[in-house]
Amino acid sequence: MKTSPKMKSTRATLIRAGCALTDGKGVEDDLQRAKLEAQARAEELSAILDAAPGMTLIARDPNCRSMTGGRVAYDLLRLPYGSNLSKSAPRGERPSNFRVYSNGRELSENELPVQRAAALGREVRDSELTIVFRNGDSRDFFGNAAPLLNSDGTVRGAVGVFVDITERKLAERFTREFYAHMIRVQDHERRRIARELHDSVGQNLTGLVLSLGALKRASARLDQKSRKALKEGLASAREAARDVRTLSRLLHPPLLREFGLPDAIRTYVHGFSERSGIKVDIQLPARHRRFDKDVETTLFRVVQEALTNVYRHSGSKRAIVRMRFNNNRLAFEIRDFGRGMKAAANRRKLKDAKVVGIGIPGIRERLQHFGGELEVHSSTRGTLLRAVLPITHSGN
Ligand SMILES: Nc1ncnc2c1ncn2[C@@H]1O[C@H](COP(=O)(O)OP(=O)(O)OP(=O)(O)O)[C@@H](O)[C@H]1O
Ligand SMILES: [Mg+2]
């Protein structure tokens, strides 16, 4: 720990007092002054601890058997002012009205940050703790702890400062739940529209194609102009039926839930290649795990959007879709060998400078919702989109 100027001056006074002792001059005066100064510093420190908006904790023994703190610490921990705050206190003195958790797991007394700082003799930073009270209330804290050292370097205690982040955590949780809800609503709505398109418009168009087909077979009696109109009408009806089918499949990838992500991607990519003439190389792991349904939908949408962009903007005739697992992270890459984003933006500017896409920001938002991120690398040799998602053991 750094020595403050005030502490230096106290020390200087004490040294002077020491010298005075050997010199035999004014000893009493200097010692008295040093004592008053030390008392003033202690009072200042105590005032700072009480005024600090965070929870400050001080243990003055290496095993943290006894712990005091600023007034806020007693208030937040709901303990009487001056009582022992340490979970390492001897039984009978130990506070029992709360338990401490981190990432959903209860911490033992030795795992608490102040105790660890004392045991390790070094700082313990960025601890996130949840304190759960006996009546079920809980509060979240974020903070650091540092050891207190004797002049010979041995540990004599430790301090910790923690800020209350309960409201921030609540806001984060709300935002996460809101996005999860939005994505579910969006997917639900897409499925509904897909069903409507398929069952109603699609069926009517198929009926129209069949009727026009029958009419065409009996069209020998029609004049040439009418026959041409009928032929064109039939072609348009067939095209519209195909478009509706494609659109309903895009809105609701039917294979995703039943067969999983790899099969849904293979089927989608196959159709995409046929329609666009772009050759897509798919590199997926041989064995695949199932993920949370919203995660699978998100990854499917990433591939869809990225390949649609390849078709619309890149000019590339080739693309690669690749999925990899690495250290509990799932990486999904879509690469093309086209003109790159800068050139694409320049081309588009000539036509319409105001067009701002929602494709890439949309998938970035979806990924962030699951704790993931989107990397975009683009040069004149092509564009690479990499979607990275952490895969936890419990859920996704
Ligand atoms: N593979 C790519 N190659 C070249 N440029 C690209 C590529 N992907 C995206 N871009 C550029 O980045 C811009 C933003 O892409 P984004 O997907 O966000 O929007 P968009 O495709 O223009 O519109 P939207 O997706 O909303 O229909 C595009 O307009 C294009 O200029
Ligand atoms: Mg796009």
Image: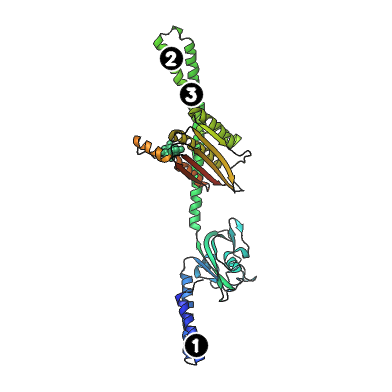
Q: In the displayed structure, would residue 241 be above or below residue 87? A: above
Residue that mark 1 sits on = 19
Residue 396 seen from this side: no
Residue that mark 3 sits on = 241
Q: Disc 1 and disc 3: Cα gap in Å? A: 101 Å
Quadrant the C terminus occupies: top right
**Residue type, numbered disc 2:** Leu
Residue at figure coordinates x 61%, y 39% from the top left? 285
Left or right of residue 314, residue 113 in this image: right
The residue most toward the top is: 221
**Residue type, numbered disc 3:** Ala
The residue most toward the right is: 91
Q: Disc 2 and disc 1: Cα gap in Å? A: 116 Å
The earlier-in-sequence mark between 1 and 3 is 1
Marks 3 and 2 close (CB-CB < 8 Å): no
Q: How is the image coloured?
A: rainbow
The earlier-in-sequence mark between 2 and 1 is 1
Residue 175 percent coordinates (x, y): 48, 49
The quarter of the displayed image where residue 127 is located = bottom right
Residue 189 percent coordinates (x, y): 49, 36
Q: Nearer the viewer, residue 15 or 84?
A: 15
Disc number for residue 230: 2
Q: Nearer the viewer, residue 14 or 128?
A: 14
Q: In the displayed structure, would residue 1 be above or below residue 340? A: below
Residue at figure coordinates x 43%, y 14% from the top left? 230
